[in-house]
Image: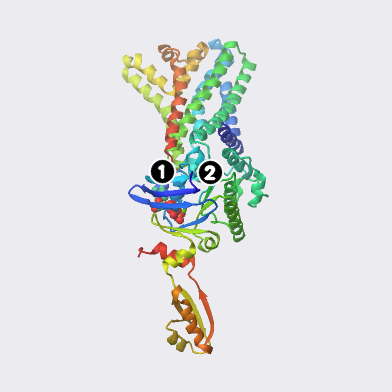
Amino acid sequence: MTRFLAITRTEMLILRRNRWLLMATLIMVLFALALTFAGSAPTGTLGVDMLTVSVASMTTLSVYLAPLLALMIAFDAIAGDVDRGSLSLLLSYPAGRGEIMLGKFTAHLAALAFAMTVGFGTAGAVAAWFGGAGPESLLALVRLILTSILLGAVFLAQGYLLSALARGATAAAGLSAGLWLVFVVLYDLGLLGAVVMDKGGTFTQSVFPWVMVANPADAFRLWNIAATEGVAMASGMTGAAQALPVWAAPASLLIWPVLGFALARAAFRRVEP
Amino acid sequence: MTDKALSITQVSKDRGKARVLDDITLSLAPGQRVALLGHNGAGKSTLIKSILGLTSIHVGTIRIGDATPGSAQARRDTAYLPEAVSFHPALTGREQLTLFAQLSGSKADVRGLLDRVGLGNALDRRIGTYSKGMRQRLGLAQVLLGQPKVALLDEPTSGLDPISRQDLYAIIDELAGQGTAVLIASHALTEVEARTDRIAIMREGRMVADDTLNNLSALAGLPIRLKVLASANPEALAAELGGNRINGASVELLCSPDDKMEALRRIAGLGDAVADVEMTPPKLEDLYRHYAQEEMQ
Ligand SMILES: Nc1ncnc2c1ncn2[C@@H]1O[C@H](COP(=O)(O)OP(=O)(O)OP(=O)(O)O)[C@@H](O)[C@H]1O
Ligand SMILES: [Mg+2]
């Protein structure tokens, strides 16, 4: 127990020392603020408060940024230590591999949570100050922050998996970039293509929503959109959300981190330092 | 309960088609210092990693005390210094050693340990700014955490300056003094010759020698070298003694340990023709060459 906390403490120290925490937080704050101001124009036409619109644009932002930031820390977690040659020494200590991974995960997730909370929190506060907020839009903001952290957890675990499978940190970085591209960009493009080809047939009706929600990035989007009518209206996509039971998106987003962590743990077991 | 700190019995390991460890048997008593020698790729690091449970073996058994490699007990009882040790460059020496102390669960005096290895002035600097030898010292400091039963040092003197090497062997003696069995993989023959109790030599995954230096010398039957300096006529001296002429005025004789006294008597009998005699017993270097290269040609 204390051993995994020792790893966590050290990892936090590293994230602060190499300015990762500062940069990630800065990026989140800047993008969130920029989107909030850019998206403030259509407020009147939709008849919702500014925070609602802000959350809708930040949801889109988070789909891209949360996986990216998570992968940026995670790819080095195992492969980096193998490259440096420090993993063999670490593994000669009584800490088990599971403890080591859990320790790193805790630190990395805490860092992501910090960056998300500060970034979205600041932008949300600014939006509420200028354009008003209600209980519903505040709830949407809290949901956005929490689900963004979950989405980060998904991709942290995926990053560890790649880091354990790759030969070296450079390869792990490349694989992570590929993974991000597939989940965040190509997956949706593929689905879009399939829907267009299908012309509203059975695929679009019954299969498509499930394939979509299986992707954690889309599950994140659906969860945030389906939960708030205002956000759904502002983002202009309600179709898929209505075709699925309410638990589908949360289930996907909760299962992924656990599954990913288990896979990463299994891959780490086979790493020979 | 065994009385051995470390026992390795008939261990073999394959990597792909190659046999990197071949029927290795070796044991260390508490407090014993054993040098592990062998050419590049002989399997020294692999053997050490299998003792740590970092890499699996296919045949044979390894025990640290009574514990199997990689078990929680074994990890508590072993200390390890990897070859070319390195750490995260963003941490300071103090932070890195504190982490290791917490992982090992020992209440260590981190500052004292860093002072002990001569890093007292650098303890709050990032490891990224350390020189190679300083990183090696930091690696050594973590070996001293807790009271390990077995210390496995993989080329501990690489990158260390002459004074630091002296310090290193003092630390090894200290470890041995407190009952830790120390296995030192090394290429620095002259150093380990004087500072270890036993020599083990590996060749292509096999253990070809494992004994004290004296016994190995006797076993190998390597000749003693006698260098006789002629006072006037080296030609005549060489003819008389039947040796080789070297560097103008000297004659070199090789004789077995049993014939040594006889040869000395003959030289003494030559009277004024001999100005000086120098005798060199076989060095570890000669022994190493004998054991590590035998059958190689
Ligand atoms: N990760 C690895 N994958 C494949 N083969 C390996 C690996 N590590 C070592 N080997 C092989 O195992 C053999 C023994 O290597 P090892 O590192 O144990 O040698 P060594 O005695 O420590 O050599 P050196 O003096 O150079 O450190 C070599 O033939 C090497 O090529
Ligand atoms: Mg080696």
Number of residues whose C-alpha sits closer than 10 Å to that of mark 2, classed few (under 14), some (14–19) or many (20 or more): many
| Image-quadrant location for residue A164 | top left
Report in which chain the residue with disc 2 lies: B
Work out whether disc 1 and disc 2 sit on a shared chain: yes
- On the question of residue A175 being in view, the answer is no
Marks 1 and 2, how far apart in space? 19 Å
Choose mark 1 or mark 2, whichever is in front. Answer: 2
Question: Can you identify the residue that label 1 sits on?
Answer: B56
Contact between marks 1 and 2 (CB within 8 A): the answer is: no
Amino acid type of the residue that numbered disc 1 sits on in the rendered structure: Ser
| Placement of B152 over or under B37, stated as above or below | above
Q: Position of residue B154 (x, y in %)?
A: 50, 52
Which colour style is shown?
Answer: rainbow
Amino acid type of the residue that numbered disc 2 sits on in the rendered structure: Asp
Point 39% across, 45% down: residue: B57
In this view of the protein, which residue sits in the foreground, B265 or B138?
A: B265
* Distance from mark 1 CB to nearest ligand 1 atom below 8 Å: no
| Placement of A202 over or under A164, stated as above or below | above
| Placement of A270 over or under B176, stated as above or below | above
Quadrant (top left, top right, bottom left, bottom right) of the C terminus of chain B: bottom left
Horizontal side of residue A199 vs A144, given as left or right = left
Report in which chain the residue with disc 1 lies: B
Q: Position of residue B61 (x, y in %)?
A: 41, 45
Question: Can you identify the residue that label 2 sits on?
Answer: B77
Q: Under tag 2, what secondary structure?
A: helix
